[in-house]
Image (cartoon, helix red, strand yellow):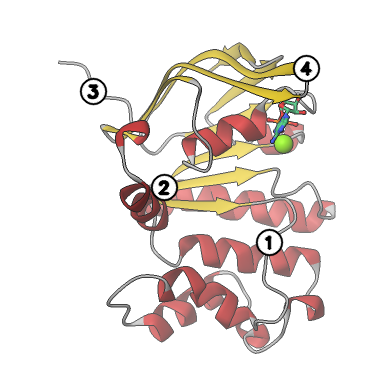
Amino acid sequence: MGKEPFIELIEVTKTYRLDANAVVALDHVNLSIARNEFLAITGKSGCGKSTLINMIGGLDSPDQGKVIIDGEDLSAMDDRSLTLFRRNRIGIIFQFFNLLPILTLEENIALPHLLKEGANSLNEKIDRLLVEMDLTQRRHHKPHELSGGEMQRVAICRALINDPDLILADEPTGNLDSVSGRQVLEILRRLKEEQGKTIILVTHSPEGAAMTDRILRMKDGRIIVDQP
Ligand code: ADP
Ligand code: MG
């Protein structure tokens, strides 16, 4: 019996309509991703990378086709189940960090956890993440007091606070200098190696793609190269 893929996209299609114009952002995409795989998605701006990530993250839904994660069809879930699934199983990291400016670093990290019922052992978890991400000195700072690299490491802590098995990173190094960018890539690699996470990384950086297990290239809403 073959092993079930962790993530499976079947004929996923998404069209955006702006007035009379239709943009096919995803065009019958089929894709299987194994548990603990580190996958890179590359391709020119506008080719559908973020749309693909958003489908897998349950942030957007396909017009046609299915997204199945760990045997669960996202389109068959009601809003509440999908929200819980996202919160507990998926961590998302964005290019522009998406930190809340009025909250301190530790409050930003705690946020997804506070949304959960029965939250406990939060401080311990935050302490551990701050040490892992080399941010212990910054705990009570606000985002504007941090460097880009530090802000992205805070966003990684926030993505990890509920211990998801899947990490989605949409151009996480796109706004960082090369040293901070490399640090973020090394952290992602470590999350795969040491914690068994499954990671999907959208990147323009050949260095970033080279650190993954498989590189997928997209063009006009389709996957054109899928090389191991
Ligand atoms: P990428 O992340 O590869 O740059 P996107 O997935 O963001 O590409 O976008 C794919 C295509 O879909 C682009 O042509 C983009 O303009 C279009 N698109 C994405 N989101 C929307 C939206 N909310 N409304 C209209 N068009 C969109
Ligand atoms: Mg994008």
Instruction: Tell which circle, 1 or 4, labels the residue nearer the N-terminal end.
Output: 4
Mark 2 lies on a secondary structure that is loop
Instruction: Tell which circle, 1 or 3, labels the residue nearer the N-terminal end.
Output: 3
- Which residue lies most toward the bottom here? 140
- Residue 210 visible: no
**Disc 1 to disc 2: CB gap under 8 Å:** no
Q: Position of residue 142 (x, y in %)?
A: 72, 82
Q: Determine whether 213 is above or below 82 in the image.
A: above
Residue mark closest to the camera, 1 vs 2:
1
Residue at the image position 69 percent from the left and 49 percent from the top: 172
Q: Position of residue 190 (x, y in %)?
A: 51, 52
Q: What label does residue 98 carry, if any?
A: 1
- Residue 108 visible: yes
| Residue with the mark numbered 4 | 21
Q: Determine whether 189 is above or below 206 in the image.
A: below
| Residue with the mark numbered 3 | 3
Within 10 Å of disc 1 (Cα), the crowding (few <14, some 14-19, many 20+) is: few
Distance in Å between CA atoms under marks 3 and 4? 41 Å
Q: What label does residue 212 carry, if any?
A: none
Residue at the image position 80 percent from the left and 81 percent from the top: 145
| Residue with the mark numbered 2 | 197
Within 10 Å of disc 3 (Cα), the crowding (few <14, some 14-19, many 20+) is: few
Residue at the image position 57 percent from the left and 36 percent from the top: 53
Within 10 Å of disc 4 (Cα), the crowding (few <14, some 14-19, many 20+) is: few
Asked whether mark 4 lies closer than 8 Å to ligand 1, one says no
- Which residue lies most toward the right here? 177
**Disc 3 to disc 4: CB gap under 8 Å:** no
Distance in Å between CA atoms under marks 1 and 4? 30 Å
Mark 3 lies on a secondary structure that is loop
